Image (tube, rainbow, N blue to C red):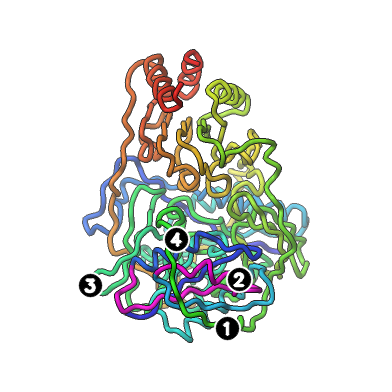
Protein backbone atom coordinates (compact mmCIF):
# COMPACT_ATOMS: atom_id res chain seq x y z
CA UNK A 1 0.00 0.00 0.00
CA UNK A 2 1.41 3.29 -1.04
CA UNK A 3 0.13 6.84 -0.79
CA UNK A 4 1.86 9.55 -2.78
CA UNK A 5 1.58 13.07 -1.41
CA UNK A 6 2.55 15.92 -3.70
CA UNK A 7 3.79 18.89 -1.65
CA UNK A 8 4.90 22.41 -2.42
CA UNK A 9 7.51 24.61 -0.84
CA UNK A 10 5.62 27.91 -0.89
CA UNK A 11 7.16 31.36 -1.08
CA UNK A 12 6.32 33.78 1.69
CA UNK A 13 6.89 37.29 0.54
CA UNK A 14 8.42 39.87 2.90
CA UNK A 15 6.27 42.88 3.71
CA UNK A 16 8.63 45.12 1.80
CA UNK A 17 9.73 43.77 -1.55
CA UNK A 18 10.95 44.79 -4.98
CA UNK A 19 9.90 43.55 -8.36
CA UNK A 20 12.36 41.97 -10.77
CA UNK A 21 13.70 44.19 -13.53
CA UNK A 22 11.66 42.35 -16.15
CA UNK A 23 8.41 43.17 -14.29
CA UNK A 24 7.29 39.55 -14.36
CA UNK A 25 8.22 38.45 -10.87
CA UNK A 26 9.47 39.44 -7.46
CA UNK A 27 13.17 39.73 -6.65
CA UNK A 28 14.19 36.39 -5.09
CA UNK A 29 15.88 38.17 -2.16
CA UNK A 30 12.49 38.94 -0.63
CA UNK A 31 11.23 35.40 -0.05
CA UNK A 32 11.13 32.95 2.76
CA UNK A 33 10.17 29.36 2.01
CA UNK A 34 8.02 26.95 3.93
CA UNK A 35 5.97 23.80 3.42
CA UNK A 36 2.48 24.77 2.24
CA UNK A 37 0.08 24.82 5.19
CA UNK A 38 -2.51 22.69 3.37
CA UNK A 39 0.14 20.05 2.68
CA UNK A 40 0.64 19.43 6.40
CA UNK A 41 -2.93 18.12 6.43
CA UNK A 42 -2.42 16.04 3.26
CA UNK A 43 0.73 14.45 4.73
CA UNK A 44 -1.02 13.79 8.05
CA UNK A 45 -3.98 12.12 6.33
CA UNK A 46 -1.60 9.82 4.46
CA UNK A 47 0.32 9.00 7.66
CA UNK A 48 -2.90 8.15 9.53
CA UNK A 49 -3.96 5.73 6.78
CA UNK A 50 -0.49 4.19 6.66
CA UNK A 51 -0.36 3.70 10.42
CA UNK A 52 -3.79 2.06 10.43
CA UNK A 53 -2.72 -0.23 7.58
CA UNK A 54 0.38 -1.48 9.42
CA UNK A 55 3.34 -3.33 7.92
CA UNK A 56 4.33 -2.75 4.32
CA UNK A 57 2.49 0.53 3.97
CA UNK A 58 4.41 3.49 2.62
CA UNK A 59 4.00 7.25 2.29
CA UNK A 60 6.04 8.85 -0.47
CA UNK A 61 6.30 12.64 -0.77
CA UNK A 62 7.09 14.31 -4.06
CA UNK A 63 7.80 17.90 -4.93
CA UNK A 64 8.75 19.81 -8.03
CA UNK A 65 11.27 22.41 -6.99
CA UNK A 66 14.91 23.41 -6.78
CA UNK A 67 17.20 22.31 -3.92
CA UNK A 68 15.50 24.73 -1.52
CA UNK A 69 12.42 22.49 -1.79
CA UNK A 70 14.33 19.69 -0.04
CA UNK A 71 13.29 21.32 3.24
CA UNK A 72 9.64 20.65 2.40
CA UNK A 73 10.40 16.99 1.80
CA UNK A 74 12.49 16.72 4.99
CA UNK A 75 9.62 18.22 6.98
CA UNK A 76 7.29 15.50 5.68
CA UNK A 77 9.93 12.80 6.18
CA UNK A 78 10.46 13.95 9.77
CA UNK A 79 6.76 13.49 10.42
CA UNK A 80 6.98 9.90 9.22
CA UNK A 81 6.91 9.65 5.42
CA UNK A 82 9.24 6.90 4.15
CA UNK A 83 10.95 8.58 1.21
CA UNK A 84 10.98 11.62 -0.99
CA UNK A 85 11.24 12.44 -4.68
CA UNK A 86 12.31 15.83 -5.93
CA UNK A 87 12.03 16.70 -9.60
CA UNK A 88 13.81 19.73 -10.96
CA UNK A 89 15.05 21.28 -14.12
CA UNK A 90 15.88 24.96 -14.57
CA UNK A 91 13.35 25.09 -17.41
CA UNK A 92 10.62 24.64 -14.77
CA UNK A 93 11.37 27.93 -13.02
CA UNK A 94 8.61 29.89 -14.76
CA UNK A 95 5.99 27.22 -15.48
CA UNK A 96 2.42 27.17 -14.16
CA UNK A 97 0.44 24.63 -12.11
CA UNK A 98 -0.72 22.66 -15.13
CA UNK A 99 2.89 22.17 -16.23
CA UNK A 100 3.76 21.01 -12.70
CA UNK A 101 0.86 18.55 -12.95
CA UNK A 102 2.38 17.14 -16.16
CA UNK A 103 5.60 16.43 -14.28
CA UNK A 104 3.76 14.89 -11.33
CA UNK A 105 1.71 12.68 -13.68
CA UNK A 106 4.94 10.97 -14.79
CA UNK A 107 5.95 10.42 -11.17
CA UNK A 108 2.55 8.89 -10.41
CA UNK A 109 2.92 6.57 -13.39
CA UNK A 110 6.33 5.46 -12.08
CA UNK A 111 5.20 4.99 -8.50
CA UNK A 112 1.74 3.52 -9.13
CA UNK A 113 0.37 4.52 -5.71
CA UNK A 114 -3.02 3.50 -4.26
CA UNK A 115 -3.95 7.14 -3.62
CA UNK A 116 -2.56 10.57 -4.41
CA UNK A 117 -3.09 13.50 -2.04
CA UNK A 118 -2.32 17.17 -2.50
CA UNK A 119 -3.23 20.22 -0.43
CA UNK A 120 -6.51 21.82 -1.52
CA UNK A 121 -4.53 24.88 -2.61
CA UNK A 122 -1.19 26.56 -2.03
CA UNK A 123 -0.86 29.34 0.49
CA UNK A 124 1.09 31.59 -1.89
CA UNK A 125 -0.89 31.56 -5.14
CA UNK A 126 -4.03 29.63 -4.25
CA UNK A 127 -4.49 28.24 -7.74
CA UNK A 128 -6.24 25.10 -6.46
CA UNK A 129 -5.19 23.59 -9.77
CA UNK A 130 -2.24 21.20 -9.54
CA UNK A 131 -3.94 18.21 -7.92
CA UNK A 132 -7.03 18.22 -10.07
CA UNK A 133 -5.08 18.88 -13.27
CA UNK A 134 -2.93 15.88 -12.32
CA UNK A 135 -6.07 13.74 -12.05
CA UNK A 136 -7.19 14.94 -15.46
CA UNK A 137 -3.88 14.03 -17.07
CA UNK A 138 -3.93 10.59 -15.43
CA UNK A 139 -7.62 10.00 -16.13
CA UNK A 140 -8.08 9.18 -12.43
CA UNK A 141 -11.14 9.77 -10.24
CA UNK A 142 -10.81 12.99 -8.27
CA UNK A 143 -12.39 15.17 -5.63
CA UNK A 144 -11.37 18.61 -4.41
CA UNK A 145 -11.52 20.12 -0.92
CA UNK A 146 -11.86 16.84 0.95
CA UNK A 147 -12.66 17.47 4.62
CA UNK A 148 -13.20 13.88 5.76
CA UNK A 149 -11.97 10.61 4.34
CA UNK A 150 -12.73 6.97 5.01
CA UNK A 151 -10.31 4.88 2.95
CA UNK A 152 -9.29 1.33 3.70
CA UNK A 153 -6.29 0.35 1.56
CA UNK A 154 -7.25 -2.20 -1.02
CA UNK A 155 -10.91 -1.20 -1.12
CA UNK A 156 -12.39 -0.39 -4.53
CA UNK A 157 -14.03 2.78 -3.29
CA UNK A 158 -13.51 5.38 -0.56
CA UNK A 159 -16.09 7.58 1.13
CA UNK A 160 -15.33 11.25 1.56
CA UNK A 161 -16.80 14.61 2.44
CA UNK A 162 -16.32 17.58 0.13
CA UNK A 163 -16.41 20.85 2.04
CA UNK A 164 -18.69 23.21 0.14
CA UNK A 165 -19.57 26.86 0.61
CA UNK A 166 -21.29 27.94 3.80
CA UNK A 167 -20.22 24.94 5.88
CA UNK A 168 -22.29 22.45 3.87
CA UNK A 169 -20.60 19.13 3.15
CA UNK A 170 -21.34 16.60 0.45
CA UNK A 171 -20.79 12.95 1.23
CA UNK A 172 -19.74 10.93 -1.79
CA UNK A 173 -18.07 7.70 -2.72
CA UNK A 174 -15.18 7.64 -5.17
CA UNK A 175 -13.45 4.87 -7.05
CA UNK A 176 -9.82 4.17 -6.15
CA UNK A 177 -7.11 4.95 -6.90
CA UNK A 178 -8.00 8.62 -6.87
CA UNK A 179 -6.45 12.06 -6.57
CA UNK A 180 -7.85 13.97 -3.59
CA UNK A 181 -7.10 17.55 -2.60
CA UNK A 182 -7.13 17.82 1.17
CA UNK A 183 -8.71 20.67 3.10
CA UNK A 184 -7.49 22.31 6.29
CA UNK A 185 -9.05 20.90 9.44
CA UNK A 186 -9.47 17.31 8.16
CA UNK A 187 -7.12 16.21 10.95
CA UNK A 188 -4.66 17.66 13.47
CA UNK A 189 -1.26 17.59 11.80
CA UNK A 190 1.49 16.30 14.06
CA UNK A 191 4.72 18.06 14.77
CA UNK A 192 7.89 16.21 13.91
CA UNK A 193 9.67 14.76 16.93
CA UNK A 194 13.40 15.36 17.45
CA UNK A 195 13.91 11.68 16.69
CA UNK A 196 11.86 12.09 13.52
CA UNK A 197 13.93 15.06 12.45
CA UNK A 198 17.14 13.06 13.02
CA UNK A 199 15.79 10.06 11.13
CA UNK A 200 14.60 12.23 8.24
CA UNK A 201 18.23 13.05 7.43
CA UNK A 202 18.87 9.37 6.70
CA UNK A 203 15.77 8.82 4.61
CA UNK A 204 16.20 8.60 0.84
CA UNK A 205 15.36 11.53 -1.41
CA UNK A 206 15.56 10.68 -5.08
CA UNK A 207 16.42 13.55 -7.40
CA UNK A 208 15.05 13.36 -10.91
CA UNK A 209 15.39 15.57 -13.93
CA UNK A 210 12.95 15.82 -16.81
CA UNK A 211 14.88 13.40 -19.00
CA UNK A 212 14.56 10.73 -16.31
CA UNK A 213 10.79 11.12 -16.59
CA UNK A 214 10.77 11.14 -20.39
CA UNK A 215 9.81 14.79 -20.41
CA UNK A 216 12.84 16.32 -22.10
CA UNK A 217 12.74 18.52 -25.15
CA UNK A 218 10.09 21.04 -24.11
CA UNK A 219 7.35 18.52 -23.33
CA UNK A 220 6.31 20.43 -20.21
CA UNK A 221 4.19 23.32 -21.41
CA UNK A 222 2.11 25.75 -19.38
CA UNK A 223 -1.53 26.78 -19.80
CA UNK A 224 -0.75 30.41 -19.02
CA UNK A 225 2.17 32.84 -18.97
CA UNK A 226 2.93 35.68 -16.62
CA UNK A 227 2.65 38.84 -18.68
CA UNK A 228 3.40 41.14 -15.76
CA UNK A 229 3.44 41.17 -11.99
CA UNK A 230 2.98 44.25 -9.84
CA UNK A 231 2.08 45.48 -6.39
CA UNK A 232 -1.59 46.44 -6.25
CA UNK A 233 -2.85 49.81 -5.10
CA UNK A 234 -3.42 49.19 -1.45
CA UNK A 235 -6.21 50.70 0.52
CA UNK A 236 -4.92 51.91 3.83
CA UNK A 237 -6.78 52.11 7.10
CA UNK A 238 -6.75 55.35 9.05
CA UNK A 239 -4.43 54.34 11.86
CA UNK A 240 -5.56 55.31 15.35
CA UNK A 241 -2.46 56.44 17.23
CA UNK A 242 -1.84 57.10 20.92
CA UNK A 243 -1.64 55.13 24.13
CA UNK A 244 -3.74 51.99 24.52
CA UNK A 245 -6.25 53.99 26.57
CA UNK A 246 -6.47 56.66 23.89
CA UNK A 247 -6.81 54.12 21.11
CA UNK A 248 -9.58 52.30 22.98
CA UNK A 249 -11.36 55.58 23.72
CA UNK A 250 -11.34 56.51 20.03
CA UNK A 251 -12.56 53.00 19.14
CA UNK A 252 -15.39 53.31 21.67
CA UNK A 253 -16.31 56.66 20.13
CA UNK A 254 -16.46 55.10 16.63
CA UNK A 255 -18.59 52.21 17.90
CA UNK A 256 -20.98 54.49 19.78
CA UNK A 257 -21.33 56.85 16.85
CA UNK A 258 -22.08 54.07 14.37
CA UNK A 259 -24.36 52.27 16.79
CA UNK A 260 -26.21 55.45 17.73
CA UNK A 261 -25.49 54.96 21.41
CA UNK B 1 -15.21 37.97 -31.69
CA UNK B 2 -15.87 34.31 -31.06
CA UNK B 3 -18.38 32.85 -28.71
CA UNK B 4 -18.03 33.06 -24.93
CA UNK B 5 -19.44 30.19 -22.93
CA UNK B 6 -20.37 30.38 -19.25
CA UNK B 7 -20.84 27.18 -17.28
CA UNK B 8 -23.54 27.98 -14.72
CA UNK B 9 -24.04 25.75 -11.73
CA UNK B 10 -26.79 24.35 -9.56
CA UNK B 11 -26.54 22.46 -6.30
CA UNK B 12 -29.25 19.94 -5.51
CA UNK B 13 -31.43 21.70 -8.08
CA UNK B 14 -30.96 25.20 -6.64
CA UNK B 15 -29.29 27.78 -8.87
CA UNK B 16 -25.85 28.97 -7.68
CA UNK B 17 -25.98 32.74 -7.83
CA UNK B 18 -22.18 33.03 -8.16
CA UNK B 19 -22.83 31.99 -11.76
CA UNK B 20 -24.32 35.46 -12.33
CA UNK B 21 -20.94 36.91 -11.39
CA UNK B 22 -19.31 34.60 -13.94
CA UNK B 23 -21.78 35.91 -16.52
CA UNK B 24 -20.87 39.48 -15.55
CA UNK B 25 -17.17 38.65 -16.01
CA UNK B 26 -17.92 37.17 -19.43
CA UNK B 27 -19.90 40.27 -20.39
CA UNK B 28 -16.92 42.46 -19.45
CA UNK B 29 -15.02 41.08 -22.46
CA UNK B 30 -17.91 40.47 -24.82
CA UNK B 31 -17.47 42.43 -28.02
CA UNK B 32 -20.32 44.18 -29.82
CA UNK B 33 -20.81 41.32 -32.27
CA UNK B 34 -19.82 38.62 -29.80
CA UNK B 35 -22.12 35.92 -28.56
CA UNK B 36 -22.59 34.84 -24.97
CA UNK B 37 -24.02 31.40 -24.24
CA UNK B 38 -24.72 30.02 -20.79
CA UNK B 39 -24.90 26.29 -20.17
CA UNK B 40 -26.64 24.76 -17.17
CA UNK B 41 -26.62 21.05 -16.34
CA UNK B 42 -29.48 19.68 -14.23
CA UNK B 43 -32.12 16.98 -14.03
CA UNK B 44 -34.67 19.64 -14.97
CA UNK B 45 -32.61 22.35 -16.64
CA UNK B 46 -35.70 24.18 -17.94
CA UNK B 47 -36.50 25.15 -14.35
CA UNK B 48 -33.19 27.08 -14.20
CA UNK B 49 -33.32 28.79 -17.59
CA UNK B 50 -35.04 31.83 -16.06
CA UNK B 51 -32.23 32.26 -13.51
CA UNK B 52 -29.61 32.76 -16.23
CA UNK B 53 -31.76 34.65 -18.73
CA UNK B 54 -30.21 37.99 -17.82
CA UNK B 55 -29.34 40.93 -20.01
CA UNK B 56 -26.49 40.19 -22.40
CA UNK B 57 -27.04 36.42 -22.56
CA UNK B 58 -27.79 35.40 -26.14
CA UNK B 59 -28.40 31.71 -25.64
CA UNK B 60 -29.08 29.32 -22.79
CA UNK B 61 -28.00 25.75 -23.34
CA UNK B 62 -30.23 23.63 -21.12
CA UNK B 63 -28.47 20.33 -20.59
CA UNK B 64 -30.53 17.51 -19.20
CA UNK B 65 -28.70 15.12 -16.89
CA UNK B 66 -29.87 11.99 -15.08
CA UNK B 67 -29.77 13.75 -11.72
CA UNK B 68 -28.81 17.00 -10.01
CA UNK B 69 -25.75 15.32 -8.45
CA UNK B 70 -22.43 17.05 -8.98
CA UNK B 71 -20.28 14.69 -11.02
CA UNK B 72 -16.89 16.09 -11.94
CA UNK B 73 -16.58 13.56 -14.76
CA UNK B 74 -19.89 14.69 -16.23
CA UNK B 75 -18.98 18.38 -16.03
CA UNK B 76 -15.69 17.67 -17.79
CA UNK B 77 -17.56 15.78 -20.53
CA UNK B 78 -19.95 18.72 -20.89
CA UNK B 79 -17.08 21.18 -21.23
CA UNK B 80 -15.41 18.94 -23.82
CA UNK B 81 -18.62 18.50 -25.83
CA UNK B 82 -19.47 22.21 -25.81
CA UNK B 83 -15.92 23.23 -26.67
CA UNK B 84 -16.02 20.88 -29.64
CA UNK B 85 -19.48 21.96 -30.81
CA UNK B 86 -19.21 25.70 -30.19
CA UNK B 87 -15.51 26.46 -30.51
CA UNK B 88 -15.64 29.19 -27.86
CA UNK B 89 -12.57 31.35 -27.36
CA UNK B 90 -13.35 31.72 -23.68
CA UNK B 91 -15.11 29.53 -21.12
CA UNK B 92 -16.01 31.07 -17.76
CA UNK B 93 -17.15 29.52 -14.47
CA UNK B 94 -17.43 30.72 -10.88
CA UNK B 95 -14.42 29.84 -8.69
CA UNK B 96 -16.48 27.72 -6.31
CA UNK B 97 -15.73 24.32 -4.82
CA UNK B 98 -17.49 22.51 -7.69
CA UNK B 99 -15.39 24.30 -10.30
CA UNK B 100 -12.26 23.48 -8.29
CA UNK B 101 -13.13 19.82 -8.94
CA UNK B 102 -13.69 19.97 -12.68
CA UNK B 103 -12.26 23.14 -14.27
CA UNK B 104 -8.52 22.38 -13.91
CA UNK B 105 -9.23 18.78 -14.93
CA UNK B 106 -10.96 19.82 -18.14
CA UNK B 107 -8.31 22.42 -18.92
CA UNK B 108 -5.43 19.97 -18.43
CA UNK B 109 -7.12 17.18 -20.40
CA UNK B 110 -8.18 19.35 -23.31
CA UNK B 111 -5.05 21.50 -23.51
CA UNK B 112 -6.86 24.77 -22.83
CA UNK B 113 -5.33 27.95 -21.52
CA UNK B 114 -6.27 28.19 -17.86
CA UNK B 115 -6.39 30.63 -14.96
CA UNK B 116 -8.22 30.26 -11.66
CA UNK B 117 -9.52 32.76 -9.11
CA UNK B 118 -9.51 35.53 -11.71
CA UNK B 119 -10.50 39.05 -10.67
CA UNK B 120 -10.51 40.86 -14.03
CA UNK B 121 -10.53 40.05 -17.74
CA UNK B 122 -9.68 42.21 -20.70
CA UNK B 123 -8.16 42.14 -24.17
CA UNK B 124 -4.82 43.84 -24.78
CA UNK B 125 -3.94 44.10 -28.48
CA UNK B 126 -6.32 41.26 -29.22
CA UNK B 127 -4.85 39.01 -26.51
CA UNK B 128 -6.93 37.86 -23.55
CA UNK B 129 -5.40 38.93 -20.24
CA UNK B 130 -6.62 37.60 -16.86
CA UNK B 131 -5.67 39.24 -13.58
CA UNK B 132 -5.35 37.29 -10.34
CA UNK B 133 -3.57 37.73 -7.03
CA UNK B 134 -0.34 36.10 -5.90
CA UNK B 135 1.90 35.70 -2.86
CA UNK B 136 -1.01 35.79 -0.43
CA UNK B 137 -2.60 38.84 -2.09
CA UNK B 138 0.60 40.90 -2.01
CA UNK B 139 0.93 41.11 -5.79
CA UNK B 140 -1.28 41.11 -8.86
CA UNK B 141 -0.43 38.91 -11.79
CA UNK B 142 -1.56 39.51 -15.36
CA UNK B 143 -1.66 36.23 -17.25
CA UNK B 144 -1.91 35.65 -20.97
CA UNK B 145 -2.35 32.46 -22.92
CA UNK B 146 -0.04 32.34 -25.93
CA UNK B 147 -1.05 29.89 -28.61
CA UNK B 148 -4.23 28.79 -26.82
CA UNK B 149 -7.40 28.79 -28.93
CA UNK B 150 -9.62 28.11 -25.93
CA UNK B 151 -9.08 29.61 -22.50
CA UNK B 152 -10.96 28.48 -19.38
CA UNK B 153 -11.07 30.81 -16.39
CA UNK B 154 -12.75 30.63 -12.99
CA UNK B 155 -13.90 33.89 -11.46
CA UNK B 156 -13.35 34.90 -7.82
CA UNK B 157 -16.67 35.46 -6.10
CA UNK B 158 -17.73 38.83 -4.68
CA UNK B 159 -15.68 40.76 -7.24
CA UNK B 160 -18.10 41.22 -10.14
CA UNK B 161 -21.59 42.58 -9.51
CA UNK B 162 -24.00 39.79 -10.48
CA UNK B 163 -25.41 40.20 -13.99
CA UNK B 164 -29.06 41.21 -13.92
CA UNK B 165 -31.79 42.74 -16.02
CA UNK B 166 -34.12 40.84 -18.24
CA UNK B 167 -32.68 39.09 -21.27
CA UNK B 168 -34.38 37.22 -24.04
CA UNK B 169 -31.98 34.42 -24.92
CA UNK B 170 -32.81 31.60 -27.24
CA UNK B 171 -32.96 28.27 -25.43
CA UNK B 172 -31.28 25.18 -26.81
CA UNK B 173 -32.10 21.83 -25.24
CA UNK B 174 -29.41 19.19 -25.12
CA UNK B 175 -28.88 15.84 -23.45
CA UNK B 176 -25.82 15.47 -21.23
CA UNK B 177 -23.06 13.56 -23.01
CA UNK B 178 -22.66 9.95 -22.05
CA UNK B 179 -19.69 9.37 -19.76
CA UNK B 180 -18.42 7.04 -17.05
CA UNK B 181 -18.61 8.62 -13.63
CA UNK B 182 -16.29 7.62 -10.81
CA UNK B 183 -18.08 9.37 -7.94
CA UNK B 184 -21.52 8.83 -6.44
CA UNK B 185 -23.52 11.19 -4.27
CA UNK B 186 -24.39 9.70 -0.88
CA UNK B 187 -25.88 12.61 1.03
CA UNK B 188 -25.43 16.01 2.59
CA UNK B 189 -24.09 17.01 5.94
CA UNK B 190 -25.70 20.28 6.94
CA UNK B 191 -23.65 22.72 8.99
CA UNK B 192 -24.06 22.02 12.68
CA UNK B 193 -26.98 23.73 14.38
CA UNK B 194 -26.06 27.35 14.90
CA UNK B 195 -27.58 27.37 18.38
CA UNK B 196 -28.94 30.87 17.94
CA UNK B 197 -25.67 32.30 16.59
CA UNK B 198 -26.55 34.42 13.59
CA UNK B 199 -23.53 35.79 11.75
CA UNK B 200 -25.43 36.52 8.49
CA UNK B 201 -28.12 38.45 10.35
CA UNK B 202 -25.90 40.42 12.72
CA UNK B 203 -25.26 44.11 11.99
CA UNK B 204 -22.33 44.33 14.43
CA UNK B 205 -19.63 41.68 14.64
CA UNK B 206 -16.49 41.47 16.75
CA UNK B 207 -14.26 38.82 15.24
CA UNK B 208 -11.17 37.08 16.59
CA UNK B 209 -8.40 35.30 14.70
CA UNK B 210 -5.17 33.45 15.32
CA UNK B 211 -3.93 36.36 17.39
CA UNK B 212 -6.02 35.14 20.32
CA UNK B 213 -3.39 32.42 20.63
CA UNK B 214 -4.97 30.21 23.25
CA UNK B 215 -8.37 28.67 23.94
CA UNK B 216 -8.46 30.06 27.47
CA UNK B 217 -8.38 33.59 26.05
CA UNK B 218 -11.53 33.16 23.95
CA UNK B 219 -13.96 33.65 26.83
CA UNK B 220 -13.02 37.29 27.38
CA UNK B 221 -13.96 38.11 23.79
CA UNK B 222 -17.34 36.42 24.15
CA UNK B 223 -17.83 38.72 27.13
CA UNK B 224 -16.56 41.76 25.24
CA UNK B 225 -18.90 41.10 22.31
CA UNK B 226 -21.76 40.66 24.74
CA UNK B 227 -20.95 43.92 26.49
CA UNK B 228 -20.72 45.79 23.18
CA UNK B 229 -23.96 44.29 21.89
CA UNK B 230 -22.09 42.54 19.10
CA UNK B 231 -22.03 38.99 17.78
CA UNK B 232 -18.69 37.23 18.20
CA UNK B 233 -17.26 35.87 14.96
CA UNK B 234 -13.96 34.18 14.22
CA UNK B 235 -11.59 33.13 11.47
CA UNK B 236 -11.12 29.57 10.33
CA UNK B 237 -8.26 28.40 12.61
CA UNK B 238 -10.32 29.25 15.69
CA UNK B 239 -13.22 27.08 14.50
CA UNK B 240 -10.90 24.31 13.26
CA UNK B 241 -9.33 24.16 16.73
CA UNK B 242 -12.78 23.78 18.20
CA UNK B 243 -12.37 26.94 20.31
CA UNK B 244 -15.60 28.37 18.90
CA UNK B 245 -18.43 26.64 17.00
CA UNK B 246 -18.29 26.63 13.20
CA UNK B 247 -21.44 28.80 13.17
CA UNK B 248 -19.22 31.71 14.27
CA UNK B 249 -16.74 31.32 11.42
CA UNK B 250 -16.74 34.18 8.94
CA UNK B 251 -15.41 33.43 5.49
CA UNK B 252 -15.68 31.30 2.41
CA UNK B 253 -16.05 28.00 4.23
CA UNK B 254 -18.14 29.60 6.97
CA UNK B 255 -20.61 32.43 7.03
CA UNK B 256 -21.13 35.58 5.02
CA UNK B 257 -21.61 38.62 7.24
CA UNK B 258 -24.44 39.67 4.96
CA UNK B 259 -26.07 42.35 7.08
CA UNK B 260 -23.07 43.59 9.02
CA UNK B 261 -22.39 47.34 9.13
CA UNK B 262 -19.58 47.39 11.70
CA UNK B 263 -16.92 44.67 11.85
CA UNK B 264 -14.12 44.75 14.39
CA UNK B 265 -11.41 42.25 13.47
CA UNK B 266 -9.07 41.50 16.37
CA UNK B 267 -5.97 39.42 15.72
CA UNK B 268 -7.31 38.50 12.27
CA UNK B 269 -4.67 38.71 9.54
CA UNK B 270 -7.29 38.88 6.80
CA UNK B 271 -6.78 35.92 4.46
CA UNK B 272 -8.66 35.96 1.16
CA UNK B 273 -10.99 33.29 2.51
CA UNK B 274 -11.85 35.41 5.54
CA UNK B 275 -12.22 38.57 3.46
CA UNK B 276 -14.78 36.77 1.30
CA UNK B 277 -17.16 36.86 4.24
CA UNK B 278 -16.64 40.45 5.42
CA UNK B 279 -14.80 42.64 2.90
CA UNK B 280 -18.06 44.33 1.85
CA UNK B 281 -18.82 45.64 5.36
CA UNK B 282 -19.08 49.41 5.37
CA UNK B 283 -16.96 50.04 8.46
CA UNK B 284 -14.19 47.59 9.23
CA UNK B 285 -11.91 48.19 12.21
CA UNK B 286 -8.73 46.13 12.44
CA UNK B 287 -6.72 45.53 15.59
CA UNK B 288 -3.50 43.68 14.93
CA UNK B 289 0.09 43.70 16.21
CA UNK B 290 1.38 43.30 12.65
CA UNK B 291 1.17 46.64 10.82
CA UNK B 292 1.55 44.79 7.50
CA UNK B 293 -1.39 42.42 8.08
CA UNK B 294 -3.56 42.47 4.96
CA UNK B 295 -6.64 43.24 7.05
CA UNK B 296 -5.38 46.85 7.26
CA UNK B 297 -5.68 47.24 3.50
CA UNK B 298 -9.46 46.71 3.62
CA UNK B 299 -10.14 48.34 7.00
CA UNK B 300 -11.40 51.89 7.45
CA UNK B 301 -9.77 52.24 10.88
CA UNK B 302 -6.76 50.42 12.22
CA UNK B 303 -5.11 49.98 15.59
CA UNK B 304 -1.62 48.56 15.52
CA UNK B 305 -1.51 46.98 18.92
CA UNK B 306 -2.30 44.18 21.31
CA UNK B 307 -5.86 42.84 21.00
CA UNK B 308 -5.99 41.90 24.71
CA UNK B 309 -4.95 45.33 25.93
CA UNK B 310 -7.39 47.04 23.59
CA UNK B 311 -10.20 44.67 24.58
CA UNK B 312 -9.59 45.32 28.25
CA UNK B 313 -9.60 49.09 27.83
CA UNK B 314 -12.60 48.98 25.52
CA UNK B 315 -14.72 47.25 28.16
CA UNK B 316 -14.38 50.33 30.39
CA UNK B 317 -16.35 52.36 27.88
CA UNK B 318 -19.47 50.20 27.80
Q: Position of residue B305 (x, y in %)?
A: 41, 24
* Residue at the spot of label 1: B174
Within 10 Å of the Cα at label 2, are there few (<14), some (14-19), or many (20+) other Cα atoms?
Answer: few
Q: What stretch is highlighted in magenta?
A: B29-55
Give the Cα separation between the discs numbered 4 and 2: 20 Å
* Residue at the spot of label 2: B47
Tag of residue A139: none
Give the Cα separation between the discs numbered 2 and 3: 40 Å
Within 10 Å of the Cα at label 3, are there few (<14), some (14-19), or many (20+) other Cα atoms?
Answer: few
Q: Closer to the camera: disc 3 or disc 1? A: 1
Give the Cα separation between the discs numbered 2 and 1: 14 Å
Q: Is residue B291 above or below residue B8?
A: above
Q: In this view, does B224 lie above or below A136?
A: above
**Res. A103 visible in picture:** no
Circles 4 and 2 on the same chain: yes
Mark nearer the N terminus (2 vs 3): 2
Q: Closer to the camera: disc 4 or disc 2? A: 2
Mark nearer the N terminus (4 vs 1): 4
Tag of residue B125: 3
Q: Position of residue B138 (x, y in %)?
A: 35, 47
Amino acid sequence: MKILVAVKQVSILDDEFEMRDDGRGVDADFFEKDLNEFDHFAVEEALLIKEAAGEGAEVVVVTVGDDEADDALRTALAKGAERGIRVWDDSLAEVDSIAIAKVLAKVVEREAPDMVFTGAQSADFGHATTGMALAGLLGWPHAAVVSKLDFVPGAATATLHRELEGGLEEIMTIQCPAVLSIQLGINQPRYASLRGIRQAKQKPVEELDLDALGLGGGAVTSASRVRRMYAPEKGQAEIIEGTVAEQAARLAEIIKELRGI
Amino acid sequence: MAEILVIAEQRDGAFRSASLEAIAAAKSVKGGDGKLAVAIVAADPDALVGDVSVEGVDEVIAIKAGSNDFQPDLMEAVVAALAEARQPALIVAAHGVDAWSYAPVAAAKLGFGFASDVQALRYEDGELVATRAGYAEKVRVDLDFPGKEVVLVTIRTNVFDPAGGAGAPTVTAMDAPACDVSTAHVGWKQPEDAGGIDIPGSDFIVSIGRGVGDESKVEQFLELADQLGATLGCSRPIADNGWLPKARQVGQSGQLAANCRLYIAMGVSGSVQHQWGMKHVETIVAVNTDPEASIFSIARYGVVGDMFEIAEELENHF
